[in-house]
Image (cartoon, rainbow, N blue to C red):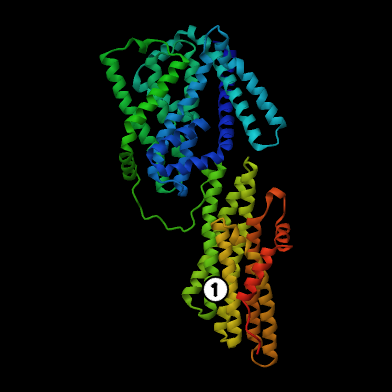
Amino acid sequence: MNIFNVLNLIGGLSLFLFGMSVMGDALERRAGNSLKALLGKLTSGRFMGLLTGLVVTSIIQSSSATTVMVVGFVNSGLMTLKQSIYVIMGANIGTTVTAWILSLAGINGESLFIELLKPSSFTPVLALIGIIFMMTAKNDRKKDTGMILLGFAVLMYGMSAMSGAVSGLKDVPGFAELFVVFKNPILGVIVGALLTAVIQSSSASVGILQALAVTGQVSYGAAIPIIMGQNIGTCVTALLSSIGTNKNARRAALVHLSFNIIGTSVCLIVFCIIKMLCAPVFLDEAAGMAGIAICHSIFNITCTVLLFPCGGLLERIVCHIVPDTADKDDSVVLLDERLLTAPALALERCRILLDDMAKCSMASLNESIEALDTCTVQLSDAIRANESKTDKYEDVISSYLVKLSTRQINDTDSLTASKYLKLIGDFERIADLSLNILESAEERKIKEISFSPDAKKELGILTSAVSEIMYLAYMGFTEDDRESASRIEPLEEVVDQLKEELRTRHIFRMQHGNCSIDAGFVLSDILTNLERISDHCTNIAECLLDNTKLGLSPHETQRELVSDNEDFRQRFKEYSSKYSLPALV
């Protein structure tokens, strides 16, 4: 083997790893929305969890990527530790699919059917289709399909280059002696674990082993322990991913490690006993690509069958290793960047936090309205705490959505991210304006400013209308209730009229000496903040009702709702009657 063979080996390995990375990333993007649907099946039980892990890993071709996502799900509260155990088990079976695909490179035969199955026959066609999709498609899904095909083509070309580069090693005595040493099971496990830990992909390390198998010097006795070790080495990715996460996420990563260590230990003991007692002849036979794929599948399926009934035991083990502690209570759970690889799930987590943010905003408004009558220290603290919480929500969610938007995501997810960014600003401003109302209530209390009985009654009507419009906005978003969202605009028109009427009436009372100028300033601030809150609720409704398919902007949507709309006129009439002011005396 000369220097040119070494260079070819390095180039082939680079293409192989690059192709696997490109194909895996494109598969994750392509299957993003499907991942959300699969995740919903986890509540059905442990068998569905196993099936979910198997299917997801088969789709994205990486048990490491699946396990990293699982750590992110557990850290974000989207999955329980118990659910994660069975998904991880399924991922170990799903990862065997890659070895079977790579084994196609070792097919030999003269028939037309066999020739068509060889990667050298169909890979160029896939590469051509992939590059056409990449250069001509405007749809993100088609572009991702092109990337998948190109990634697979590059991967198979890399595999072919590696196999060709190492084929000459069969005549090198030192290489044969090296694999004689690897027949020591313990050493084989260590080598397999180290190799996989370095490249952080058991699928890639199995592919490298399959490429070396073309030399005919890799026996089953040497390959099987290496395959066992590869399952331990792949845990490094999940362990690194769990750094800085909560205790359950760290436990999920340890489940992956403990599952593979226990499974490997049991299988290694059985392997050593069989080797000493029976000395099977096949262990000295040369392993082919398909043979390695078979061993990989049998080992992973065996480990899963052995440990599947022991999910509860694995949970107790990792809970003992990472015990419960008095974690600092943080009401805002930070979004996990591991979920950025699955945009649909990242957006789902953003929506969960946005629901909490909307609840904080509504609580701030209701508490500030209550403070207008009775301004207590407890109310003041609660309003300020909620306002501070919404600020934190805004920072965390908006930063996360900006990071998500820089990723290659499909049009639907991009529109959803844009909608959430708009909603964040409105919910945050509602909390700010509620704090302004509290400050007006505190000023009124400090300066001992009183409103006339008529002013109090009229203000009560306006605050009731604003409370209802806030509730409609909350329900419209959290329940995806278009009926509630469609009621906001007519009620906002009523709020606008009430605000102007209250100002007019206050001027009338000042002219007749029934109200002070100081009270007028405070009242004016309250009216302005209440009216602005209703405006932000309208922004929320417009965002929820925006007809993106027709390309309408929010303002166009509003005009569509108002003009020649019988429902709008009927609701406006209904709310005008409900929140009518008493006759001016």
At x 52% / y 76%, what residue is drawn?
A: 370
Q: Relative to 46, is 431 above or below?
A: below
Q: Residues within 10 Å of mark 1 (few under 14, many from 20)?
A: many
Q: Relative to 149, is 108 above or below?
A: above
Q: Residue 492's spot in the image, x, y percent?
A: 65, 69
Q: Quadrant of residue 555?
A: bottom right
Position of residue 241 in the picture relative to residue 559 (left or right): left
**Of 547 and 333, which appears nearest the observer?**
547
Position of residue 181 in the picture relative to residue 345 (left or right): left
Q: Residue 392's spot in the image, x, y percent?
A: 54, 59
At x 68% / y 30%, what residue is drawn?
A: 134
Q: Residue 154's spot in the image, x, y percent?
A: 61, 23
**Which residue is the extreme one toward the bottom?**
513
Quadrant position of the C terminus in the picture? bottom right
Tell me which amino acid carries mark 1: Ser
Q: Quadrant of residue 254?
A: top left
Q: Decide if residue 536 is in sight here.
A: no
Q: What element carries label 1?
A: helix
Q: In which quarter of the image is residue 368?
A: bottom right
**Of 495 and 573, which appears nearest the observer?**
573
At x 64% / y 48%, what residue is drawn?
A: 415
Q: Residue 518's spot in the image, x, y percent?
A: 64, 86
At x 46% / y 16%, what residue is drawn?
A: 290
Quadrant position of the N terminus in the picture? top right
**Which residue is the extreme one toward the left?**
277
Please tell me how many numbered marks the rendered image carries: 1
**Of 411 and 245, which appears nearest the observer?**
411
| Residue at the spot of label 1 | 368
